[in-house]
Amino acid sequence: MKPWHSLLLALITVTFLPVLAPAQKTQSFRLESLSPKFAELIDANAKLETVASGFGFTEGPMWDPAGFLYVSDETINKIFKVYPDGRKEEVIALGDPDGNTFDQQHRLIDCASVLRAIIEVTPDGKYKVLADRFEGKRLNSPNDVIVGPDGAIYFTDPTLDLVAGEKQEIPFQGVYRLDASGKVRLLTRELGQPNGLAFSPDGKKFYVDDDEARNIRVYDVASDGALIHGRVFGEEPGGKGDGVPDGIKVDKNGNLFVTGPKGIWVWDANGNHLGTIVMPEQPANLTWGDPQYDTLYITATTSVYRLRTKTRCFVPYLRH
């Protein structure tokens, strides 16, 4: 989620009435290549398709092999199933749902900002809290979540969606690991506002965005799971009102697709910016989908888009 969107939460009443998304800068879809490698990932003639529109603010896309996406709407306060033909089905009504993932048992895991918790969304449209505290103190507002190669749940906990009037109990914005026993382990507290996160395909590197610093950080993963040798992987600068580093997805070769100013920035594993997918609406997150997992599904403000690529995904909960 972008920092300016946290301001919207202050306008939501205790009944979480929808609010209008802020006006967006007008721009057209295009591919801005900075390296010949960009064309190896996305065809120069690739077409962006609109899957569905009419949302408040879209986040947390997750492709289900049954043939649909889960999509969070942070202003309508619901999670939907969105089908390739644009149909929407409500899954659950929940104050400010954010990032989603599947665990290795194919349970839908959501960052429930208003609940200040990581939850499991159950098939009957209810939820179960998996974690809402660290060392006895309430989490801030969990933002994005992934499952690691080890099967544990990893999530970021900035203050971007901390409910207006509620107290921040943890005096920092952390990145955490949640294991099967329910234990929450702090991995790092050095980011200003941690957001999107991802593992490299070999599990040896861990990436996390910092909205405040407008950069992507990378860590080495130690044998005990600790994050070490943190450093800046890439910068995504922009002007006031532009997008910031948010959702991250990685392909099978370790290339990163990261939302940022104007659209989606594509990076190779060495930190080289290969090009940008300029979007008609500012994106917040993205996921791989379709049977071959070669299509990017992108949540961008009021809409969901798809873009066919020439590469395929890396997703830790899938067998590769």
Image: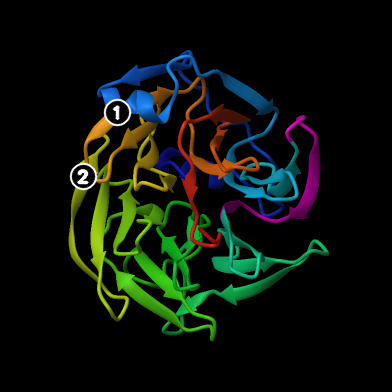
Label 2 secondary element: loop
Question: Residue 88: horizontal and vertical position, in percent?
Answer: 78, 38
- The residue that disc 2 covers is 270
Residue 49 as seen in the image, left or right of residue 224: right
Residue 142 in sight here: no
Residue 8: say if magenta: no
Residue 24 as seen in the image, left or right of residue 128: left
The quadrant in which residue 319 appears is bottom right
Label 1 secondary element: helix
Question: Residue 181: horizontal and vertical position, in percent?
Answer: 54, 86
Q: Earlier in the sequence, mark 2 or mark 1?
A: 1
Q: Is residue 186 above or below residue 147?
A: below
Question: Label 2 is placed on what type of residue?
Answer: Asn
Q: Residue at x 48, y 46 (%)?
A: 313
Nearest to the eye among marks 2 and 1: give it.
Answer: 1
Residue 305 as seen in the image, left or right of residue 94: left
Disc number for residue 274: none
The region drawn magenta spans 84-99
Q: Residue at x 32, y 60 (%)?
A: 206
Q: Nearer the viewer, residue 302 or 196?
A: 196
Question: Residue 265: horizontal and vertical position, in percent?
Answer: 35, 33
Farthest residue to the front: give it: 320
Q: Is residue 12 above or below residue 104?
A: above
Question: Residue 164: horizontal and vertical position, in percent?
Answer: 51, 55
Residue 71 in sight here: yes
- The residue that disc 1 covers is 37
Q: Nearer the viewer, residue 74 or 203?
A: 203
The quadrant in which residue 115 appears is bottom right
